[in-house]
Amino acid sequence: MNIVDCKITHKQKKVKIKNRYYNIDIKIIPLVRWLNSFQSVVTQFSCQGDKVQKRTTFLPYVSFFCEDSKDLNNIVRKINSVDDVNLHCYLDEDSGRTVYNMYFNCYKGMNDLIGRF
């Protein structure tokens, strides 16, 4: 399976997150809402993934900031309760903030995690 970075348009829904409205891919809305239920979390980007061609797949992901170690610990514990999900982080040098990227190895991983909250 090849994983390629490009923009795909999915059906989206306008969703209120922390007093603002955002267009979010329908299948990943529960995950974005759950992450933003933590006071210190702000999601930055997300994609529900898509199988575009026979051999090209765009897998689900969410990118977010988390400013509280207790919130992050709760998120990590939930992530660790399912297979097929990885959490990577890096320091955004422009903002000085840590960016967390949650990647799913398959759609089942995303759906399993959503089913746990």
Image (cartoon, rainbow, N blue to C red):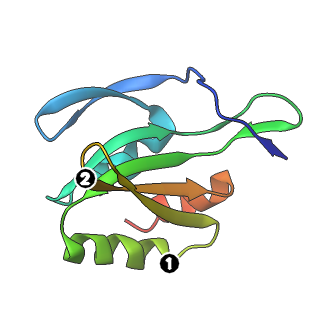
Residue 36, how many percent across, how many down?
25, 51
Q: Amino acid at mark 1?
A: Asn
**Image point 59% across, 24% down: which residue?**
7
Q: Residue 75, how many percent across, how many down?
A: 35, 70
Could you tell me which residue is drawn at 64 percent across and 66 percent down? 84
Query: Is residue 68 found left or right of 90 in the rendered image?
Result: left
Kind of element beneath mark 1: loop
Name the amino acid type tagged 2. Answer: Gly
Does 29 sit above or below residue 97? above
Give left or right: position of 6 versus 93.
right
Among the 4 quarters of the image, the one containing residue 41: bottom left
According to the picture, the residue beneath numbered tag 2 turns out to be 96
Residue plotted at (45% across, 48% down): 62
Q: Secondary structure at mark 2?
A: loop
> Dot 1 corresponds to which residue?
80
Side of 100 relative to 82 (left or right): left
C-alpha distance separating marks 2 and 1: 26 Å
- The quarter holding residue 37 reads bottom left
